[in-house]
Image: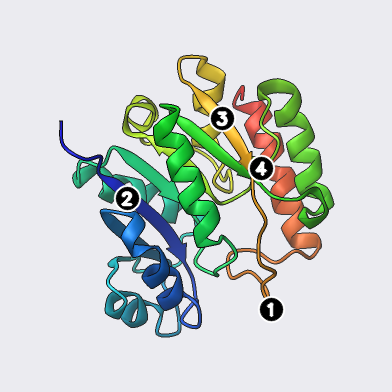
Amino acid sequence: MGPLVKTAIIPAYNEEKTIADVVAVNRKLFTHIIVVDDCSADNTVEVAKNAGAIVIESPKNRGYDAAINKGFFEAGKLKSDVYVTFDADGQHQYKDIKRGLDMFTREGLDLLIAMRPAHKKHFSEKIFAFYTALKYRIDDPLCGLKFYSGKAYGRFKPFSTYESIGTELALRISKSGEFKTGAYEIDIRDRTDVSRFYEFSWKGNYRILKSLVKAVAAGL
């Protein structure tokens, strides 16, 4: 058996200021880095390509979940063994991504979810996390830094059946009880502007709570 094919999946929307550094810093950790551009209005596509990423362009803005699902589909075509999602804004640091990869492969995990400090979560995220911690021992389902095995992804693909804000696959894997899962603590850099995918105004909190309701309705 050869080395594992490790693929990073980075959803991006108007992240021209940060995407080059995110790709460049993490390139040596991965066999492939896929940036899924969600119809950005800036130069995210060109900057990501120049940094060495495989760039998938969406013809129209479809949102975070569609971007993640598309990235997984493309990574599957590359026969990936390990699928890793993280953000394009630089909040997830190289040291934590590397530590997660090492833990994931060393322990033979199928799902590994990073956990942000509690004080960096908004109230709606804490409510969501309270539910998933009770049901699945998942303390931070909304953290964008997650690691998946090809076996686990293959069991549930395609997985974007509702607006889950990147949580559906992790919840389905956890609910099945068939896979080895884990979690680890990280810190995150504070971004200096607003998240491109959703703002943490009342609208952002509403989206998260709505996603939680849909997860419950889906039996997750």
Residue at the disc numbered 2:
7
Q: The disc labelled 4 sits on which kind of residue?
A: Ser
Nearer the observer: mark 1 or 3; the answer is 3
Nearer the observer: mark 2 or 4; the answer is 2
Q: The disc labelled 3 sits on which kind of residue?
A: Gly
Q: In the rendered image of this protein, does residue 182 appear above or below residue 9?
A: above
Rendering coords of residue 54 (x, y %):
26, 65
Residue at position x 43%, y 59% in the image: 10
Q: Quadrant of residue 38?
A: bottom left
Mark nearer the N terminus (1 vs 2): 2
Describe the element under mark 2 as helix, strand or loop: strand
Nearer the observer: mark 1 or 4; the answer is 1
Residue at position x 83%, y 54% in the image: 119
Label number found at residue 192? 1
Rendering coords of residue 144 (x, y %):
56, 51
Q: In the rendered image of this protein, does residue 147 appear above or below residue 52?
A: above
Q: Alpha carbon of mark 1 to alpha carbon of mark 3: how far?
A: 30 Å
